[in-house]
Image (spheres, rainbow, N blue to C red):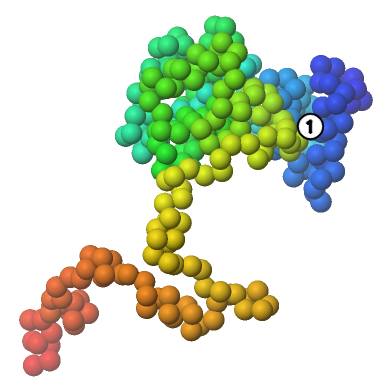
Amino acid sequence: MTDQISEGLSDQTIADLHELAGRYPQARSALLPMLHLVQADQGRVTSEGIAVCGEILGLTEAEVSAVATFYTMYKRRPMGKHHVGVCTNTLCAVMGGDEIFERLCGHLDVGNDETSEDGQITLEKVECNAACDFAPVMMVNWEFFDNQTPESAVEVVDRLRAGETVQSTRGATITSWREAERVIGGFEDGLVDEGPAAGPASLAGLEIAAERGWSAPPLDASGAEATRESTAQAVDEADTRRAESENVVEQSAADVRGGEDPDESEATHD
């Protein structure tokens, strides 16, 4: 029955869908990666893909559709070769994310969640990319492009449309959205170790610790956490003067008495 329903899905994808279902104690837990794999094959979540996932997992098409329409990473319309997501959440917006998005809309002649006429770029506003220290951030096929400007964003998009090799600022060489979807679905592409894992902003705390000779409390022979003595020592050595000064407030009589009005309290006692 699967072969009849899945006309259009490749034999490899069908085999991979079954493999995903077998990775979990409860097969239905595989639905999320399976939908990504459908997108890798067909460029979106199709009715066919929904039917096949449901058949493999023993779910109704309504149950699969409920998941596919809930999460914004699942697309029901054909996608471009590359997905460009511009973060416009608070910090990225303040740092220029809104301007970047508007510039790309004009440059590509598209609106939010629309695809350029040449089929190369689907542009979308995305929620926080968890990279606020690199704001404003743009992602291409879920790879980071940090500290962007309208000009640098346009340059990235133009290079992608020209078929040039583009390297993420903090990750792998850009492939395509479909190839990235296959990775998200659980099948590695061999690029996991490509590119730097962290940038200067993420490493600032580590550099400060090195400058000041700070280190994590040692483990005992069994690998247990630090002893009470070492923890207490770390607390004593921590520089909390700024935090303490910011929390010092003048106490009023009401503060001392736990919120009672001094006059009423005295009258009551009298």
173 with respect to 205 (left or right): right
Image coordinates for residue 38, horizontal then vertical, percent: 74, 27
Kind of residue sitting beneath label 1: Cys
Residue 238 seen: yes
Q: Residue at x 49, y 20 (%)?
A: 156
Q: Which residue ends up furthest to the bottom in the rendered image? A: 270
Residue 61 versus residue 40: which sits nearer the camera?
40
> In which image quadrant can residue 188 be found?
top right
Q: What residue appears at the point 42 percent right and 51 percent down from the top-left corner? A: 204
Using the image, determine if residue 207 lies above or below residue 101.
Answer: below
- Percent position (x, y) of residue 200? 44, 45
Q: Residues within 10 Å of mark 1 (few under 14, many from 20)?
A: many
Q: Nearer the viewer, residue 18 or 167?
A: 167
Position of the C terminus by quadrant? bottom left
The relative height of residue 265 versus residue 217 in the rendered view (above or below) is below
Using the image as rendered, state which of residue 10 and residue 65 is in the foreground. Answer: 10
In the image, 192 versus 112, the foreground residue is 192
Name the quadrant containing residue 132. top left
At horizontal 68% and vertical 29% (from top left) the residue drawn is 181
Where does the N terminus fall, quadrant-wise?
top right
Image spot of residue 201 (x, y percent): 42, 46
According to the picture, the residue beneath numbered tag 1 turns out to be: 53
Observer able to see residue 72: no
Where's residue 56, x and y in %?
84, 35
Q: Left or right: 269 with respect to 93?
A: left
Q: How many marks?
A: 1
Residue 42, image quadrant: top right
Residue at figure coordinates x 79%, y 27% from the top left: 51
